Image (tube, rainbow, N blue to C red):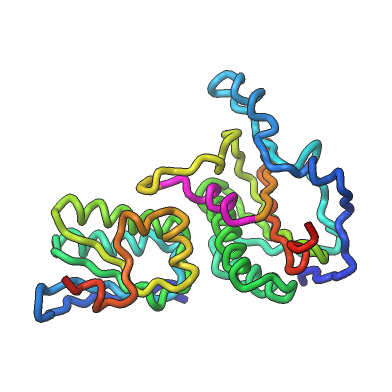
């Protein structure tokens, strides 16, 4: 059901890294908008969300409140992809937090999609919620804060996070580097 | 299917009695209300020491963490102490990343949590 194509290399080149650089791309513009008319957030995905490789044959997993299943699927897929145990735990926490945001904020089910190439594994959470804070997940919440850790944890735990939010919903892509790829640089 | 189970014991020890809440399974946004109810009920009895045994808890997300932080505040308010015991790797990762382990003491065993 999930793609596990070792030859399934996402179109990427050295210059793509810049387009995927993490940062509040629209931060300055967004902060000038009048309150009450918030602008949806786009971070890291650049001009437009690139479709994952061969999305057409993908069968995303739909979740409503079955987050335990989401975690189990991420764990088993990441394990097969060769992610180390420690990073695997981090990815499970991150995806679970992203999916928990669906349960907290989106009045719709969410979907989980996963793919990997030889460099990295990517987990994508989509839902119909809208994130309007351009710094969402970028600020460390006070340790005694009783909310707001979720998206911050996602950013702490993953090697790269892409976030795109618009009227049609939110996409969060969580990237983890696979073994061996670390050593290249 | 119950993803999360919580059992409560009042432990008569040589020293002070303490309340032991043992969690098992996975605690997340979908069941943290139930967890909050259990903890609220115990905190309301104003025990001097409330120990939460996390040894069988396989997973805890930030919503469940917030329930623990909230219980810690409530224990503080009446002068009691909340302690966490036996967190597994994933749960401990969450406690450390959020610095919750700086707010709530974490011990390797229930015995350690109740010693002194």
Residue A28 horizontal side relative to residue B105, left or right: right
The answer to whether A35 is drawn above or below residue B110 in the figure is above
Residue A92, image x, y percentages: 59, 65
Residue B7, image x, y percentages: 29, 76
Residue at 33 percent of width and 66 percent of height: B106
Q: Quadrant of residue B46?
A: bottom left
The answer to whether A39 is drawn above or below residue A63 in the figure is above
Q: Quadrant of residue A112?
A: bottom right
The answer to whether B64 is drawn above or below residue A168 in the figure is below
Residue at 69 percent of width and 60 percent of height: A176
Residue at 40 percent of width and 43 percent of height: A142
Magenta: main secondary structure equals: helix
Residue B81 horizontal side relative to residue A164, left or right: left
Magenta region: which residues? A147-158
Count of numbered badges drawn on the protein: 0
Q: Quadrant of residue A77?
A: bottom right
Residue B64, image x, y percentages: 41, 59
Residue A28, image x, y percentages: 64, 24
Residue at 55 percent of width and 43 percent of height: A137
Q: Can residue A114 be seen from the camera position used here?
A: no
Foreground: A56 or A46? A46
Q: Quadrant of the N terminus of chain A?
A: bottom right
Q: Can residue A145 be seen from the camera position used here?
A: yes
Q: Quadrant of the C terminus of chain A?
A: bottom right
In reply to whether residue B72 is colored magenta, the answer given is no
């Amino acid at each position: 059901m999930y793609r596990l194509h070792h030859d399934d290399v996402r179109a990427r080149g050295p210059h793509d890294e810049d387009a995927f650089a993490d940062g509040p791309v629209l931060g300055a513009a967004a902060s000038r908008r009048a309150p009450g008319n918030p602008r949806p957030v786009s971070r890291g995905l650049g001009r437009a969300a690139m479709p994952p490789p061969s999305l057409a044959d993908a069968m995303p997993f739909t979740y409503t409140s079955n987050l335990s299943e989401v975690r189990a699927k991420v764990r088993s897929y990441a394990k097969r992809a060769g992610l180390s145990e420690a990073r695997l735990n981090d990815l499970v926490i991150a995806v679970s937090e992203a999916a928990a945001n669906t349960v907290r904020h989106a009045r719709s089910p969410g979907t989980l999609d996963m793919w990997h190439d030889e460099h990295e594994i990517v987990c994508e959470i989509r839902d119909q919620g809208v994130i309007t804070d351009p710094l969402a997940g970028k600020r460390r919440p006070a340790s005694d804060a009783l909310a707001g850790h979720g998206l911050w944890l996602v950013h702490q735990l993953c090697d790269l996070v892409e976030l795109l939010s618009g009227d049609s919903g939110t996409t969060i892509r969580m990237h983890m580097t696979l073994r061996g790829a670390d050593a290249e640089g | 299917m119950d993803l999360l189970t919580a059992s409560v014991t009042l432990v008569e020890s040589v020293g002070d009695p303490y309340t032991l809440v043992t969690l098992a399974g996975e605690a997340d946004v979908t069941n943290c209300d139930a967890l909050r109810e259990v903890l609220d009920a115990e905190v309301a009895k104003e025990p001097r020491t409330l120990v939460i045994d996390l040894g069988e808890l396989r997973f805890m997300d930030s919503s469940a963490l917030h329930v623990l932080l909230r219980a810690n505040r409530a224990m503080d308010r009446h002068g009691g102490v909340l302690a966490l015991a036996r967190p597994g790797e994933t749960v401990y990762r969450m406690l450390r990343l959020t610095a919750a382990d700086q707010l709530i003491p974490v011990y390797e065993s229930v015995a350690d949590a109740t010693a002194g």
